[in-house]
Image (cartoon, rainbow, N blue to C red):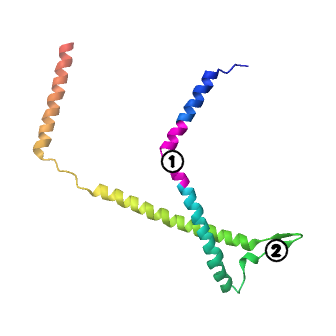
Amino acid sequence: MKRIKKDRIANKSKGLFDEFKEFIRRGNVLDLAVGVIMGSAFGKIISSLVDNILMPIIGIIIGGYDFSDLAIKVGGARIKYGLFIQNVIDFLIVAVCIFIFVKVINKILTKNKEEEKEEPKEEIKEEVILLREIRDSLNSSKKSTRSAKKK
């Protein structure tokens, strides 16, 4: 069995710690934390919307059912499929909201890219193009004469 050197372990752990510090400094952790908190709050709002507004309206439309009370009794267990239906509706509403949000963001980003492409580029005068070609030609001829002199 090989003996592990303490210095090697210390160096690896120091490298890992430095990498972690860099990860935190880049702001990814902060962005992730804000996203999770906002997502959690958004989820609560959607759940409240479904539970307190949409499901009672849907219940009235289909004949006065309260979905949270819908259940099947099997033996001693009670299968609450009404709550499952509410959670599926929660999910669908959240998915639609996220889809719309991403679609709007993508539209804004593509609009910005199109605006950047539409910016007019400077037209280069014909004289400038000719002067650049002459310069390049002179530079290439200087290089070829230098290499010929070295031989």
* Mark positioned earlier in the residue sequence (2 or 1): 1
Q: Position of residue 128 (x, y in %)?
A: 12, 42
What's the residue at 19%, 22% (across, down)?
144
Compared to 63, does 73 lie above or below? above
111 or 86: nearer the viewer: 86
Residue 35: image quadrant is bottom right
Q: Using a 10 Å C-alpha cutoff, classify the residue at mark 2 as few (fewer than 14 neighbours), some (14 to 19) or many (20 or more).
A: few
Q: Secondary structure at mark 1?
A: helix
Q: Is residue 1 left or right of residue 75?
A: left
What residue sits right under mark 1 in the picture? Answer: 28
Q: Is residue 43 left or right of residue 115?
A: right
What's the residue at 58%, 64% (across, down)?
41
Q: Is residue 67 left or right of residue 146?
A: right
Q: Secondary structure at mark 2?
A: strand
Give the residue type at disc 2.
Answer: Ile
Taking the view exactly as shown, the residue that stands out farthest to the right is 75
Q: Using a 10 Å C-alpha cutoff, classify the residue at mark 1 as few (fewer than 14 neighbours), some (14 to 19) or many (20 or more).
A: few
- The quadrant of the rendering that contains the N terminus is top right
Q: Write the start and end of the magenta stretch as one range.
A: 19-33
- The quadrant of the rendering that contains the C terminus is top left
What residue sits right under mark 2 in the picture? Answer: 72
Q: Position of residue 130 (x, y in %)?
A: 12, 40
What's the residue at 64%, 82% (across, down)?
57
Give the residue type at disc 1.
Answer: Asn
